[in-house]
Amino acid sequence: MLRIAIPNKGMLSEPAWNMLGEAGYRLRHNPRQLVVQDPDNDVELFYLRPLDIAVYVGSGTIDVGITGRDLLLNSETEAREELALGFGASTFRFAAPQGSPIDNLEDVDGKRVATTYDKLVGDYLAGHGIKAGIIHLDGAVESSVQLGVADLIADVVSTGTTLRNAGLRVFGDPILHSQAVLIASPRVQQDDERLTVLSRRLEGVLTAQHYVLMDYDIPVGDVARAIAVTPGFESPTISPLHDKQWVAIRVMVPREKVNRLMDELYEVGARGIIVTALQASRI
């Protein structure tokens, strides 16, 4: 059985559960349940703390898992990223007090940086030739400067409201753009069929989330113009109709572009446009 670790709580948990459910895997029905057997798919799901997932996967105790890229890079394990999953986006930034002379990365040299992500920050600074003291904190990092523990912080930033309320401002380039990722143990080969099946199913869910099917009829003489409007995720399917002057076209298009594409298709002579949501099982 393929052992899969998923977050038991936090902002990554519900989207991860939904994605696996849409991919056809069995989920828990009891929030106290920590392990779910899914013999139909030959997998075993383990609900674990997000911070621990990369450790379990990196050690080989768990075969694959869903966690944040930031947590993976900070884990000091040999787990590897297999697939970006498109949710849980966040940005990791430096922040210093308002009015502080710390305004760029070079100014961090010799300073004290408070963070929960010691390795991630340490590797980033070392990669840029910056020597600074890393102060590890498990939470409330934004309070460290006011309390005199650090000169600046490095933390996840979403809206920036928490930082502003603490009298801090971001500076410099982002340390990391993070999101949820599928990770694999070094003991699992990249061509392992079990990993291939899981990755394909999750890619199918991603495709279904971001694309829709568009069907329309177009005069034969306008096919080239129509295809220029909707080249699609892959090449469009063109089918003959009873009326030899017309053909039917089916194509996958980005969900967010549907309205604009419909307007453009009507301008080139299309008719009978139908938009259908994709189902992951059909990918």
Image: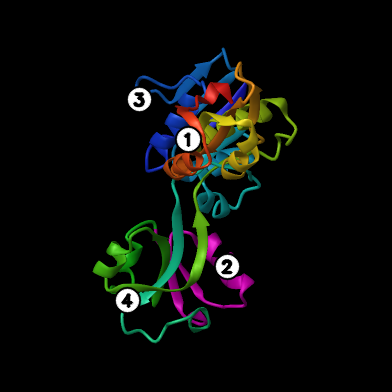
Question: Within 10 Å of the Cα at label 4, are there few (<14), some (14-19), or many (20+) other Cα atoms?
Answer: few
Which structural element holds mark 2? helix
Q: Nearer the viewer, mark 1 or mark 4?
A: 1
Label 3 Cα neighbours within 10 Å, binned few <14 / some 14-19 / many ≥20: few
Q: Which residue is mark 1?
A: 209
The quadrant where residue 125 appears? bottom right
Q: Amino acid at mark 3?
A: Arg
Q: Residue furthest top?
A: 40
Choose the circle earlier in sequence order: 1 or 4. Answer: 4
User: Would residue 108 appear left or right of 59 to someone viewing this image?
Assistant: left
In the rendered image, which residue does mark 3 sit on? 32
Query: Helix, strand or loop at disc 1?
Result: helix
Does label 1 or label 3 sit earlier along the sequence? Answer: 3
Between 273 and 44, the one lying in front of the other is: 273
Q: What residue span does the magenta drawing correspond to?
A: 108-137
Which mark is on residue 148?
A: 4
**Callout 1 touching callout 3 (CB < 8 Å):** no
* Residue 150 occupies quadrant: bottom left
Check if residue 135 falls in the magenta segment: yes
Q: Is residue 108 above or below residue 189?
A: below
Residue 124, numbered circle: 2
Q: Position of residue 211 (x, y in %)?
A: 51, 36
- Indicate the amino acid at tag 2: Tyr
